């Protein structure tokens, strides 16, 4: 492959795609969900309709086909529309990628809001590593408070969306982690230095 800008961009896209595939495989193999499992009966109907979609598909296409299905966690009820960004920029290579997305509904709902807010920015790049860091931060917030897993996620997600509106830029993943760590400490949640939020 030529060592020019196009070649480097293709290598970066390929590396990102491979990382996404590895992450999906890991998520599917792991049975240790941080959130309670979703309702099985509704999931069966969702699975049938999801398998009928032609993949690869955009987030908008997935939402158009299965957006009205509901996914329940122990704390809340979500529609797939709440969990999958309704945008053409978001692409899913397989039904497994969508399943991974809806498996952790609290994190998926927050990421959907952030991704849709980032779509309003001109020339905004929300790369895979930054998105992964955001997801890890939201997952750490869920784990920090087992009683009310939405409180921290909602607060940090609201902060990110507000920053996008006010500053016309996504905060860095480090800024998001710092804000999440501050939220945890202000609300009495223990954050050790060796944890993701221990920044």
Image (spheres, rainbow, N blue to C red):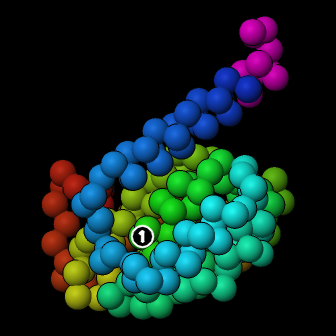
Does the segment drawn in magenta span residue 6?
yes
Q: Quadrant of residue 7?
A: top right
- Magenta extent: 1-9
Q: Residue at x 33, y 75 (%)?
A: 37
- Label 1 neighbourhood size at 10 Å, few (<14), some (14-19), many (20+)? many
Look at the numbered disc 1 and give the secondary structure of its residue: loop
Say if 51 sits above or below 117 in the image: above
Residue 114 in sight: no
Residue 40, image x, y percentages: 40, 79
Q: Which residue is mark 1?
A: 104
Looking at the picture, tell me which residue is in the foreground, 112 or 63. Answer: 63
Instruction: Please give left or right for residue 163 compared with residue 135 in the image.
Output: right
Does the segment drawn in magenta span residue 98?
no
Q: Residue at x 27, y 58 (%)?
A: 31
Residue 55 in sight: yes
Residue 84, image x, y percentages: 63, 70
Q: Residue at x 29, y 65 (%)?
A: 33
């Amino acid at each position: 492959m030529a060592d020019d800008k196009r070649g480097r961009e293709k290598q970066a896209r390929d590396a990102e795609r491979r990382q996404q595939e590895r992450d999906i495989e890991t998520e599917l193999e792991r049975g240790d969900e941080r959130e309670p499992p979703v309702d099985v009966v509704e999931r069966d109907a969702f699975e049938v309709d999801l398998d009928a979609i032609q993949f690869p598909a955009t987030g908008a296409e997935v939402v158009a086909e299965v957006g009205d299905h509901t996914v329940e966690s122990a704390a809340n009820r979500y529609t797939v529309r709440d969990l999958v960004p309704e945008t053409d920029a978001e692409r899913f290579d397989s039904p497994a990628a969508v399943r991974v997305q809806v498996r952790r509904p609290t994190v998926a709902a927050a990421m959907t809001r952030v991704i849709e807010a980032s779509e309003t920015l001109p020339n905004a790049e929300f790369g895979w590593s930054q998105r992964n860091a955001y997801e890890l931060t939201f997952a750490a917030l869920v784990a920090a408070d087992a009683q009310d897993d939405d409180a921290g996620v909602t607060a940090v997600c609201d902060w990110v969306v507000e920053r996008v509106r006010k500053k016309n830029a996504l905060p860095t993943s480090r800024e998001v982690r710092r804000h999440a760590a501050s939220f945890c400490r202000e609300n009495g949640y223990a954050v050790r230095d060796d944890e993701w939020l221990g920044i």
